[in-house]
Each structure stands twice: as C-alpha cells, then as structure tokens.
Amino acid sequence: MANDGITPPEGFNAGARTYDDAVRHNIAGSDRLIMSLPGGEYATVLDVACGTGWTSAAMLRRFPVRRIVGVDASQGMLDQFAAKLGTEFPDVAVELRNEDVMRMGVPDGAFDAVLCAMALHWFPDKTGAVAQMARAVRPGGVLAILTIGRGGEEAWRQVLVDVGAPPEWTGWFAQNQRDEGEMDADLRAAGMEPLDVWMERRRRHADPDAFMARTRAVAGHLLRNPPGGFSELDQRIERGLHDAAGPDGFAYEYSKLYAVARRPEA
C-alpha cells in the first residue's frame, strides 16, 4: 500500500507481516488485472505502491520478466516484498525504492509495464499520480491499474456514519472512488491509449471481526491505534460492524475498477 505524501506509512509498516492474509480479495483482483494484459514482452516492470509484492508475483508467474522495480512509501512492505520475491523468483533482478508516487526517481520511458494495484485511491492527486506512472512507460508498453470503483460500500459507509466516525472516514468514499469515465480521462490526459476499462461489483458477507481485521490492515493509519492496543474510534467501528451484522455476517457491496492502457508507439 502506498503513501500519498501526507498519510504516514507507519500503519502499513506495522501491518506488513499480516497484510496478505487480510486482503486476499485484493490479491485475487491483482491476478485478474495481470491476466487482462495483452500478450507481449515485459522484460522490465515497475510496480508502484507495490506493497508486499503480490501484483509483481502475479506478473512473474505469467511473463518471463527479467527486472522489477518496486516503489512504496512503507519500508515494512518493501521488506516483505524482498523476502517474498527473493524466495519464489531468485533469478529475477529486483530493485526496491522507498519513495512516494509523486517523487519516484525512475527514468521516463524505461519500463515495458507499469503496475499499480489497490493504491490509487490513497493518492490525493489521482490525475497527477496516473501521469507520473504513465511517464515511466516506454512507447508500446502498458500501464495497468486496479483501484476502488465508484458506487457500492454504502453499508460500510453507513456503519461509519452511525458510529460518528470523523469526516476523513465518512467522506472518504466520494473523494477517493473512481469510475470508468474518470479513469479513461486520466489515462488519455497522461498520453495513454485505454485498451480496457471496466468495473466489477460484488456483494459479500463477511465475519465482522474479519472485516475489522482488514480495515486495520489497509487503514490503520486512519485508526491511530496505539502500540499494542486499539483507539476509541477503532473500538466504536468494531462494535458498529457487529451491530450491523446479520445471521450471515456483515453484508456489503464492493466495486473494483480495472484499467489497462498502452503508450502509443512514437
């Protein structure tokens, strides 16, 4: 998970070791994103907000990648990335950079593929972030993005409203979700040619404790939990999830937005 230049990465550092267990649906989404890429040669790959490396791992399982550069603002996530890819893919050259998306020190036009999975929604300047990622794509190369789609999550937002969560929680959805048209416009503004932009919407039932564990993994920096404990806000949200749950658990709808684009040949 990425940092936006404002959001501190400490929450992601603390949860890096258990992050994958909490976000298995995101990992499955990354697999679908990689499978949607057109066939081709992807020798050099940039993974932006790479987290623990599951998107890069999916890329390596499909294509004979020779070099991967992973960028993330959380050093804890990068440490997990290094351990994971070093064990499973020892012959791949890996460079890890503890950097923010808006200040990546990677050269322009240097990568066959640039990936960004489940992180764009954390960047305040989404249009600017897409442009920063696109500048690193070589002519003929691709940019692939997975983020939170607009719509859905009303049940989750209502829980936050009911427990009196602050505006950074209740207003997060309208501010950070994206739809197909917005993504298409950002890609074109960055000089990319959209190949496929689509939305998946799902209805799920989750154990309230499992949903809370996922929330702590992906939004721990907003909960502001003290070391070894839970904030008052954390406890209110946890109680709210249990209150909203039915016999099948907490029911909610969730949308994911996918995009694949190509940089036109010069």
Image (cartoon, grey):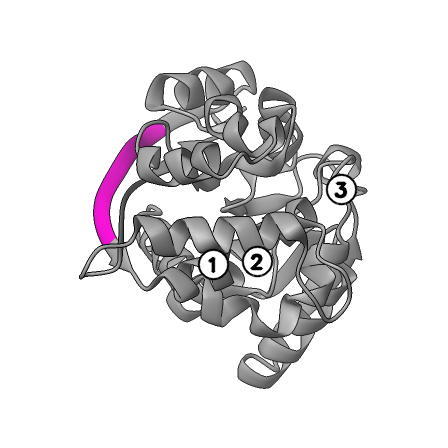
In the visual, does 48 lie left or right of 209? right
Question: In the rendered image, which residue does mark 3 sit on?
Answer: 100
| Relative image position of residue 84 (x, y in whole percent) | 59, 77
Q: In front here: 7 or 112?
A: 7
In the image, residue 19 sits, relative to residue 110, either above or below, namely: below
Question: Which kind of residue does numbered mark 3 sit on?
Answer: Asp
Q: Residue at x 58, y 28 (%)?
A: 130
The rendered magenta stretch, by its main secondary structure, is classed as strand
Question: Which kind of residue does numbered mark 1 sit on?
Answer: Met
Viewer-nearest of labels 3 and 1?
A: 1
How far separated are the C-alphas under marks 2 and 3?
Answer: 21 Å
How far separated are the C-alphas under marks 1 and 2?
Answer: 6 Å
Question: In the rendered image, which residue does mark 2 sit on?
Answer: 216
| Relative image position of residue 16 (x, y in whole percent) | 65, 67
Q: Residues within 10 Å of mark 1 (few under 14, many from 20)?
A: some
| Relative image position of residue 38 (x, y in whole percent) | 33, 46
Q: Earlier in the sequence, mark 3 or mark 1?
A: 3
Q: Residue 196 magenta-drawn?
A: yes
| Residue 101 seen by the camera | yes
Q: Residue at x 63, y 63 (%)?
A: 67
Question: What residue range appears in magenta?
Answer: 195-204
Mark 3–mark 1 CB contact (< 8 Å):
no
Question: In the rendered image, which residue does mark 1 sit on?
Answer: 212
